[in-house]
Image (spheres, rainbow, N blue to C red):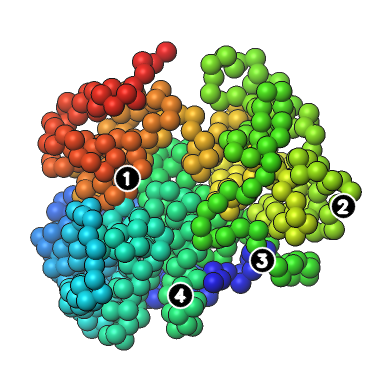
């Protein structure tokens, strides 16, 4: 299966065009040769028409091209008429997207008033109870008939009105039926979406696109690659556009790193026709991140076909994560890398000299080796690799500065050539192959996150070196944060926090800050903060603890997927979360 034309040369995946709204009056065309469309979601109550209009206008003012609004009930969906009318009266014709989960009737109502409807297959026709059940072939077929009966009316209505549909699966809300057949897997997400796509195609409806969202960048990357490979196998007329996003990315630097890893690496693979960066911040903050991320792709990709590159297979399986096998070596005194050791952080001598005096003995963020002190072989993978210098698999290698390739292509090529030579040498990854003028910190963060994120998701890399961020302390912190976001090591509390929307039952930014203030010293503990139950119990399946909005002013607490406390008053919920962490032996007192 192939998800891109070449792992070395950038070529945008060609998709059919899906028109959303009237392109002559603010609408957009997604797919084809058109630029990637940037979108976001407002966060207020859908019944508050004035607030919805105000937030939409603010998003449009900073460059948002599609605005999504939740419609959890028929009543909310009906109010989209007022929101749309008020926006049009004010001269704003941005296409609106209704976000639907549990209510097919709400989808039918919303389609009357907005240009696009997003449905989540795991929630639209199924109720999720985490039930374990074996489905006989006849039972499974009957379930598909039931789903068809629920989804077909929306397809027919959208076809008659000229509306678009996004078939958006989420890792956290796969149906029990899909989970029991395919597991909690990328394959399950793809199959869930294809079931709905087949129903649409039965009605000769092709005005739809796909999304495969997860809070885990590695899972998200695997899902999209697998989806595009499956679409390619199904035939040229299955070339539907792709929406990219890492859901529940969080806030601040962590949210930007996760989003850049998932979205950016796929954009570099040529995938993606529309994107959203989901931050636990005001929605307007998402748009500049989207724009900055898109602006980096030409720099981070390679399109010079004059340079001869091998047609050989990749050194990794793009659809299943597996870390590249290497021997363990000594990177520095007392520091091992490769093998089963964690991925290490290397710094330049200049960075070490600045940060070393400030590091305490118990510090979790500290340099683990100095670049200039390494026993390191630097190779140009565009040239023949000298075997005489690779007599041992224990020689640490990297790509030579000045190699005429972007970072992702260069390190993929190095890993492939080492495999061809039957060599398993550990690899030091770099975020750049040339020392450039100082980049603005937000751009350095995005570039490093895309480059490292793509390679780490490929299973390549045993140590990393950040040089694009010139601030010494910032570059050290960025390296550790990238490894944490990629799931390669854990040096601090890990948070999965959803972006706010009209379904959210508490102030996500305030509550997230409150929870972090109490728990950010809990190294290795993962806490999910979810505004409602739409994706909560599923998306936080690998979290240790969950804080989920259950009703207005009421919070449910989870351990993994298991609900433990129900309907706690919000004023008490953070204290009870701390108590729960204590009860399960995960609490330590802060220094």
- Mark found first going from the N terminus, 3 or 2: 3
Query: Does the CB distance between marks 3 and 1 fall below 8 Å?
Result: no
User: Mark 3: few, some, or many residues within 10 Å (few <14, many ≥20)?
Assistant: few
Identify the residue at horizontal 71%, vertical 48% (top origin). 424
Helix, strand or loop at label 2? It is loop
Q: Quadrant of the C terminus?
A: top left
Instruction: Determine whether label 3 and label 4 are within 8 Å by CB.
Output: no
- Can you tell which mark lies on residue 240? none
Pointer 4 local density, CA inside 10 Å: few below 14, some 14–19, many at least 20:
many
Mark 4 falls on what kind of element? helix
Q: Position of residue 388 (x, y in %)?
A: 89, 48
Q: CA distance from mark 2 to mark 1?
A: 47 Å
Q: Nearer the viewer, mark 2 or mark 4?
A: 2
Distance from disc 3 to disc 1, alpha carbons, whole Å, reads 34 Å
Any mark on residue 231, and which?
4
Is the Cβ of the residue at disc 2 closer than 8 Å to that at disc 4? no
Kindly identify the residue that appears in the image at 64 percent across and 68 percent down. 6
How far apart in space, not on screen, are marks 4 and 1 (Cα)? Answer: 28 Å
Q: Does dot 3 land on a helix, a strand or a loop?
A: loop
Q: Residue 102 lies in what quarter of the image?
A: bottom left
User: Is residue 406 visible from the viewing direction of this image?
Assistant: no
Q: Nearer the viewer, mark 3 or mark 4?
A: 3
- In front of the other: 84 or 261: 261
Q: Which mark is residue 541?
A: 1
């Amino acid at each position: 299966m192939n998800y891109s034309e070449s792992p070395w040369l950038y070529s945008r995946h060609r998709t059919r065009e899906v028109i959303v709204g009237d392109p002559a009056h603010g609408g957009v065309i997604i797919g084809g040769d058109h630029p990637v469309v940037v979108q976001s979601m407002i966060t207020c109550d859908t019944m508050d028409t004035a607030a919805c209009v105000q937030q939409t206008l603010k998003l449009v003012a900073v460059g948002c091209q599609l605005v999504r609004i939740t419609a959890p009930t028929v009543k909310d969906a009906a109010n989209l008429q007022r929101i749309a009318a008020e926006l049009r009266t004010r001269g704003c014709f941005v296409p609106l997207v209704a976000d639907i989960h549990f209510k097919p009737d709400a989808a039918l109502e919303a389609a009357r008033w907005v240009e696009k409807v997003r449905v989540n297959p795991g929630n639209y026709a199924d109720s999720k109870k985490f039930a374990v059940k074996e489905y006989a072939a006849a039972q499974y077929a009957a379930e598909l008939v039931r789903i068809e009966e629920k989804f077909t009316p929306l397809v027919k209505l959208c076809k008659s009105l000229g509306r678009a549909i996004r078939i958006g699966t989420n890792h956290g809300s796969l149906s029990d039926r899909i989970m029991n057949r395919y597991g909690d897997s990328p394959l399950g997400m793809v199959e869930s979406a294809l079931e709905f796509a087949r129903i649409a195609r039965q009605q000769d409806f092709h005005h739809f696109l796909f999304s495969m969202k997860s809070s885990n960048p590695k899972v998200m990357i695997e899902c999209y690659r697998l989806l595009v490979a499956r679409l390619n196998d199904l035939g040229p007329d299955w070339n539907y556009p792709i929406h990219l996003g890492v859901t529940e990315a969080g806030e601040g630097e962590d949210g930007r790193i996760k989003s850049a890893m998932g979205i950016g690496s796929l954009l570099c693979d040529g995938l993606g026709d529309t994107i959203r960066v989901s931050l636990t911040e005001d929605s307007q903050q998402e748009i500049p991140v989207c724009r900055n991320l898109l602006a980096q792709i030409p720099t981070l990709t390679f399109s010079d076909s004059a340079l001869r590159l091998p047609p050989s297979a990749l050194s990794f399986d793009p659809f299943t994560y597996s870390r590249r096998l290497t021997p363990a070596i000594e990177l520095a005194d007392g520091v091992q890398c490769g093998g089963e050791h964690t991925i290490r952080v290397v710094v330049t001598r200049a960075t070490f000299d600045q940060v070393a005096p400030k590091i305490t003995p118990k510090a979790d963020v500290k340099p683990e080796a100095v670049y200039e002190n390494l026993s390191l072989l630097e190779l140009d993978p565009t040239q023949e690799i000298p075997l005489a210098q690779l007599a041992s698999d224990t020689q640490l290698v990297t790509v030579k500065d000045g190699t005429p390739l972007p970072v992702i292509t260069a390190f993929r090529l190095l890993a492939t050539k080492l495999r061809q030579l039957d060599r398993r040498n550990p690899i030091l990854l770099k975020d750049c192959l040339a020392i450039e003028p100082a980049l603005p910190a937000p751009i350095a963060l995005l570039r490093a996150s895309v480059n490292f994120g793509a390679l780490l998701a490929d299973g390549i890399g045993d140590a990393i070196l950040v040089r694009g961020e010139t601030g010494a302390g910032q570059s050290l912190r960025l390296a550790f944060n990238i490894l944490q976001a990629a799931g390669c090591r854990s040096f601090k509390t890990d948070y999965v926090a959803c972006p706010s929307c009209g379904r959210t039952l508490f102030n996500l930014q305030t509550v997230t800050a409150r929870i972090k203030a109490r728990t950010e010293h809990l190294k290795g503990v993962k806490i999910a903060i979810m505004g409602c139950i739409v994706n909560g119990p599923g998306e936080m399946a690998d979290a240790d603890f969950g804080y989920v909005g259950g009703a207005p002013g009421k919070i449910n607490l989870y351990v993994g997927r298991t609900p433990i406390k129900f309907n706690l008053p919000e004023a008490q919920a953070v204290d009870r979360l701390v108590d729960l962490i204590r009860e399960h032996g995960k609490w330590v007192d802060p220094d």
